Amino acid sequence: MELNKAIRIPKQKRSIITNEKIIKTAFKLFCEKGYYKTTTNEIAKIAGVSIGSFYSYYKDKDTIFMKILDDYNKLFLEINNESELAINLYKSDKKKWLQKLINKILNIHESSKQLNKEIKILSYSMPEIAEINKKHHEIIIKVILEYLHMCKNDIKISDLYVASIISYNIISSTVDHIAFEETIISRERLIEATVEAVYKFLFK
């Protein structure tokens, strides 16, 4: 789906405010009720706009959901952009860098916990959402890979791309456990153990 062709880009202040109300309402309903149980009529009603006004901004429910996912995707892109600022930290203290990366990913997941659950469910039936989910993974793997290249002589594994994927899978498992499961183990202990595991796996 080409998102920009399916939505109206608001330019005037009033239109921007209306659009933000629609997006915030849709996000809230998708998180509370799930994608399939949310309707465009309900979004419009709670947002305080007419259904005609809703359709002047968004073609259908799929379109606004994709817009929300596009905004969510930008949070992951920020990790990539911020990575340049952490180069000195990576070179001076790799464990602290890993801890910072894990916390950043975790904060994104926790800020949109219910949306994340919907993304996982819908990924099985909607290829375009599965593709966005895949991009989230690829962004983090790319960040890890770029850092491994900086100190490749210190890395145990010769295939840095595979090393990045495995490292990400370890981190992702911990993030999902903390964000989506009930656990008696503290967040700090889980992150500390994950940092140790990834560090020992990667570095000589």
Image (spheres, rainbow, N blue to C red):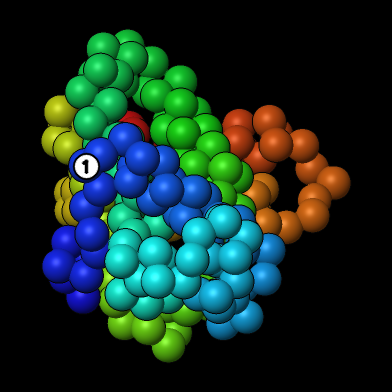
Please count the marks in the image: 1
Q: Quadrant of residue 199?
A: top left
Quarter holding the C terminus is top left
Tell me residue 197's x, y (percent).
Answer: 51, 42
Task: Name the foreground residue: 164 vs 40.
Answer: 40
Check the image and name the residue furthest to the right: 184
Tell me residue 143's x, y (percent).
Answer: 25, 40
**Residue 148 appears in view:** no
Residue at the image point whose x is 70% and y is 37% from the top: 187
On the picture, is 97 further left or further right than 50?
A: left
On the picture, is 191 further left or further right than 73?
A: right
Task: Name the foreground residue: 13 vs 176.
Answer: 13
- Disc 1 designates what residue? 11
Check the image and name the residue furthest to the bottom: 125
Q: Secondary structure at mark 1?
A: loop
Tell me residue 61's x, y (percent).
Answer: 42, 75
Residue at the image point whose x is 17% and y is 61% from the top: 4
Q: Quadrant of residue 43?
A: bottom right
Tell me residue 8's x, y (percent).
Answer: 23, 59
Quarter holding the N terminus is bottom left
Task: Name the foreground residue: 81 vs 56.
Answer: 56
Residue at the image point whose x is 29% and y is 19% from the top: 86
**Residue 15 appears in view:** yes
- Residue type beneath disc 1: Lys
On the picture, is 203 further left or further right than 6?
A: right
Local crowd size for mark 1, using a 10 Å CA cut-off: few (<14), some (14–19), many (≥20) = few
On the picture, is 74 further left or further right than 153?
A: right
